[in-house]
Structures are given as structure tokens and as C-alpha cells.
Image (tube, grey):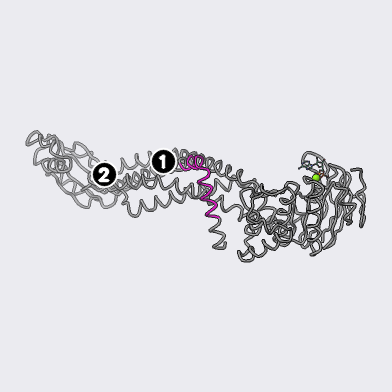
Amino acid sequence: MRARTSGRHIREAFKSVKRNGWMSLAAVSAVAVTLLLVGSFIAILFNVNKLASDIENDVSVRVYVDLAADEEQRVALGENLEKIEQVESIEYSSKKNELDQVVGSYGDEFNLFEGDDNPLRDVYIINTLKPEDTAEVASEVAEMDNVAEVNYGGAEADRLFELMGTARNVGAIVVLALILTAVFLISNTIRITIFSRRTEIEIMKLVGATNWFIRWPFVIEGAIIGLIGALVPVSIITFVYINGFDTIMKYLAGTYFSLLNPAPFLIYLNALMLGIGILIGAIGSILSIRKFLKV
Amino acid sequence: MIEMSNVYKKYSNGITAINGLNIKIDQGEFVYVVGPSGAGKSTFVKMMYREEVPTQGKIQVGKFNLVNMKQKDIPYLRRYVGVVFQDFKLLPRLTIYENVAYAMEVVEKNPKVIQKRVLEVLELVGLKHKVRMFPNELSGGEQQRVAIARAIANMPSILIADEPTGNLDPETAWEIMEVLEEINNQGTTIIMATHNSTIVNRMKHRVLAVENGRIVRDQAEGEYGYES
Ligand SMILES: Nc1ncnc2c1ncn2[C@@H]1O[C@H](COP(=O)(O)OP(=O)(O)O)[C@@H](O)[C@H]1O
Ligand SMILES: [Mg+2]
């Protein structure tokens, strides 16, 4: 396409968006709402996925020592743990130490548990050689004396993955329905433009304008609506994600877990939303112009 | 050159508008298409620029085979065949100049070429002094002349006019005929469907009479031949 021609198409498209003010606004809003949901959904899904794999990759098994156990029994337990084949390293954290950590990350309210009031237990933190070993090690440890409780990430990860599988399916259906609605609204908006310009289209066809020459202004009009519609959720999600990221990461400090970094995740997500917006718009207009171009 | 052989056209409502039609028209001819209302005149000319596609038969227009032609070649056929209608179809918000230029812009002609050609065709139809006016400031005859100027702007080899004087008073009709005659003298084939017996009988050309979707009379320098 020649530069002169594209300039003409783009001018025509912008004129139309303005002329159809309210319809354009409705279509822009539909795209905005759709993409806001799509974008939030993707952001949440990907982060939960990230957390789940963080959990899954966690090689640690936490072994809580029974409160009734004395010093000697506790040391014996430690020695037994060392004998397990898949264990790479063992770390011991006394209940005092555990409390200090909690106070460190959640604040002074926990300060009231001092000395013998400490409700926490002594803990052995086992690191296994591989993440897959945790389940087996945990069940082996649970059999041992003086063990109050055994925790490991794998079990929770499985539950999380399962939950996400369902969320993904339900989400995909909702997203698809929303996208179809947006396409429908855009194609209706474009239909009004086409209708108001039907004499021009008729003349263009009669004097031999090519189908793409006739189509372009409408496709661009749809794409502009889609793009404007996408800019709204892009701004909202960018703002919320960056702020949310800082806040949540503060809580996750010192743990094995983290959210996806805004760069590059947010950049990809925004590019995806802009892309979907433009595509929804273009498809919407191609759909409505199709039948006008026969003959 | 236009050639139709054994052409049938049945509309989706079951009406057979063209019923086994054969014709050959050479480059540079001036042809009237006459016949009663509903005889199939419009359908006949519409098939020449592929507004309608025949149900059966062969149609050749210049180098275009209109039956098994590809969708993407249709725009090029339309540049080869210009069309004028009874109701002008001008764009009310564009000036006379812009209306004609529009036809050239949408086929992506060079702006310099457009400027020169638009003035040329408007001079040919005698409206060069009204380029800045809008269609509603012009008489019916003048509007039809703008439509003709637009139809020939892209230099088609064939000009089709379906009842171009149908909405005009007799005197204005003659203005149009003079313009068409001039265009024909420059070598463009003219095919004109009409009900105007005075014109056909006075400005003599080949006459094709259509009845029930067939050509029942093909007469050089012919008469209109129906009661008017
Ligand atoms: N688009 C159409 N769909 C169905 N029937 C049509 C259509 N156009 C014309 N016809 C029918 O075809 C016949 C020929 O019409 P037309 O070619 O317009 O005749 P004319 O121009 O000689 O008056 C008429 O009976 C008319 O009703
Ligand atoms: Mg007719």
C-alpha cells in the first residue's frame, strides 16, 4: 500500500470513530472491560502458577519436634534424620529462633509471647536432594518418635495445580464469551459506519476500487477502537500490579516464594492485551464488512 | 468488444430475466437497448459489469471472461466499463470537482494526473465553471453530466448508461445525449438502455429490442419501435 493511500485510510478511520461517538464509546468500553478481566485473570493465573512451582521446587521438609520431648530425645531425633538417604542437609531452629523470625516479619504483636509463653515448637528443616524426594522423606519422618508434625511443599503444590486447572478452564470460557461480546459490539459499531457510507462504498465498487482499498478504513477504525479500549486496562493493570508487587513482595521477603517481576512479565501482558484489543477490533470490522463487499 | 452467447439469468425468486440471449457489440459502437418495462434491459446491461452474474452462458467483455472470473479481477473490469444511472449517485457532501476526483482517488491514481483529468472531463461535459459547487446546487441535467464525467474519469473503453435521461425533461435530455455522442466520438463504446423514443428516432444508432429476456430486433440506425 502506498503512503498516500494509508494516510487516507487512517484519516477516514479517525473521522468515523469521532462521528460514531457514542457507539464507539460503547465498543471501547466493551473492549476495556473484557481486557481488564482477561488481563487480571492472566496476571493472577501466572502468579499462582509461579507460586505453585516455587512450592513444588521447595526441597525443604519441616519437622516439628514434640513439645514433650526433652533435650536428649531432640538430639536423637536429629541424628536419626541425618541417616535418611535422600537428605542433603539439616538445619535446626529452636522455638525461640522461630519466634524471633515471626516477630521480624509480622511485627511486635507477637512480642507478648515471651519466654515460656512461646507457642511455637523446635524445628528441624531438612533439605532433600531433589524436590520429588520430599513426600517420601516426610512419610518416613512421620513414623519417628517425638515428631509432632511434618510439613512439606509438594502436597500443597499438588492441590494448587489442581485448583488452577479448574480455574483455567472456567476462565477460558468466560474470557472467550467476553471476547465474542466485544467483537460483536465492535462489528455493530462498524456496521453503522458502513451503513452511513453505503453510497460511497457503492461508488467505490462501481469505479473499480479494490476490496482491500474499501476495507482498510473500516479495519483501521475497528483496530483504533480496540487499541483505545486496550489502553484503559493496560494502565489500570500496570498501576495495580506494580503497587501490588511491592506490597506482596515485602511479605514474601525471606521466603522461598516470589511473584513474577513486572519486567518482563507486565510488558508481555500489556503487549498481549494491546494485541488482543487490536485483533478484536479488526476481526469485528472484517466480519461486518464481509457481506457488503459481495458483487 | 462485448460478446454474449446463449446467456440465461434466473433470479433467486424464480424470475428468468434473460432467456437465451446472443449478442456481439464492437468497440466504438453506440447501442440503444429498448423494450417494454420488465423486459430484462437492466439485467442485460448489469451483466456487462458483473453486477449480475448469468446462470448460464458465456460473456466476454474486452479481455475479461465474466463467467469464470476471479473475484479479485472485478475491480479491473469496473475500470474498463464505466456506469451511469438514472439517479446519478453523487456524494452530496463533496463538490463537483471532488465527486469526480473521488473516482480516481479510490483507484489510487496520482494526484497530478487526477487534477488534470478531472478538469478535462468536466470541460467535456460543460461544467468546468461549476467545479466548486455542490450537487444540490445543480440542475438534474447538470448532475447527470457530473455522473458521466465521473464514469469516464478513469478512461473506460465502454460506458453503460441505464436510462440516463429517465429523470430529466426532454430539453435537458438532449444535453446529456450531446455529451454521450461526444464521448462516443472519442472512441468509447456506449450502451444505453432507454424509454425515450424521440431520442432513439432522432439520434440514429444501432437498436437492440429486448422482450422476455431475448433480443427480438437488432437494427442498425434503428427505430424505437414501441408506442411512447
Ligand atoms: N434483483 C432482482 N431480483 C429478482 N428479480 C429481479 C431483479 N431485478 C430484476 N428482476 C426481475 O427481472 C425482470 C427484468 O427486470 P429488468 O432487467 O429490471 O427489466 P427492465 O430494465 O427492462 O425493466 C423483471 O421481471 C424484474 O422484476
Ligand atoms: Mg431497467
Q: Residue at x 70, y 61 (%)?
A: B154
Query: In the rendered view, does B34 fall on the left or right side of A185?
Result: right
Neighbor class of circle 2 (other Cα within 10 Å; few <14, some 14-19, many 20+) is few
The residue nearer to you, when weighing A272 against A106, is A272
The residue nearer to you, when weighing A82 against A93, is A93
Quadrant assignment for ligand 1: top right
Residue at mark 2: A248
Chain where mark 2 sits: A
Give residue A171's quadrant in the image.
top left
**Where's the N terminus of chain B, which quadrant?**
bottom right
Question: For the residue labelled by badge 1, is the local secondary structure a helix, a strand or a loop?
Answer: helix
Query: In the rendered view, does B5 fall on the left or right side of B143?
Result: right
Q: Position of residue A105 (x, y in %)?
A: 17, 43
The residue nearer to you, when weighing B22 against B96, is B96
Q: Position of residue A190 (x, y in %)?
A: 56, 44
Label 2 CB, ligand 1: below 8 Å?
Answer: no
* A76 to B126, vertically: above or below: above
Residue at mark 1: A37
Type of amino acid at the residue the image marks with label 1 = Leu
Cα distance in 3D space between marks 2 and 1: 21 Å
Give residue B40's quadrant in the image.
top right
Provide the residue span drawn in magenta. A9-28
Q: Residue at x 30, y 48 (%)?
A: A242
Magenta span: predominant SS is: helix
